Image (cartoon, rainbow, N blue to C red):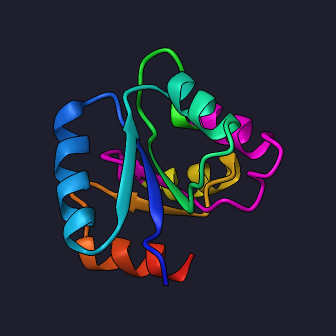
Amino acid sequence: MSKKRVLLIDDDPRNIFALKATLKAKGFECVSCLSAQEALTILQKDEVIDAVLIDMMMPDMDGYEAIPRIKNIPGRQETPIYAVTAQAMVGDREKCLQAGATDYVAKPIDVDRLVGLLVGS
């Protein structure tokens, strides 16, 4: 089985650094970008991306706007998208799912849960 490729989208390079190191240690290949617009460009290419982790709170285009746009890219309708956010308020999970996210992961990230989601996708 080949490594799963995960696209990390977060406007904070420290979050990308930490997630990338953690996921690489668990056997995943990671691609990253600092904006949703950059992610859309990556996803419109023929690049193999098995799952997307997207920070919901970003300037310019947040995850709530980006997820439906990702789902509208031909061939990306079934790509699992996991919303990642520090906003762990009542109703946030539902709001992420309504935007089209496959599931929701609150910060600080439970690595075992995240790996379980990614392996299952």
Total numbered labels? 0
**Which residue is depicted at the point 16% across and 37% down?**
14
- Residue 61 sits above or below residue 23 on the image: above
- Residue 118 sits above or below residue 72 on the image: below
Rendered image quadrant of residue 67: top right
**Which residue is depicted at the point 25% across and 75% down?**
26
- Camera-nearest residue between 2 and 56: 2
Q: Is residue 6 left or right of residue 63?
A: left
- Camera-nearest residue between 86 and 91: 86
- Camera-nearest residue between 29 and 64: 29
**Which residue is depicted at the point 26% across and 42% down?**
16
Asked if residue 105 is among those painted magenta in the image, a careful observer would answer no
Q: Position of residue 61 (x, y in %)?
A: 54, 22
Q: Position of residue 58 (x, y in %)?
A: 41, 26
Q: Position of residue 114 (x, y in %)?
A: 36, 71
Q: Is residue 106 left or right of residue 39?
A: left
**Which residue is depicted at the point 46% across and 60% down?**
5
Asked if residue 79 is among those painted magenta in the image, a careful observer would answer yes
Q: Position of residue 29 (x, y in %)?
A: 37, 60
For the C terminus, the image quarter is bottom right
Residue farthest to the top, as pictured: 60
The stretch in magenta equals: 64-89
Q: Is residue 83 left or right of residue 42?
A: left
- Residue 39 sits above or below residue 47 on the image: above
- Residue 115 sits above or below residue 37 on the image: below
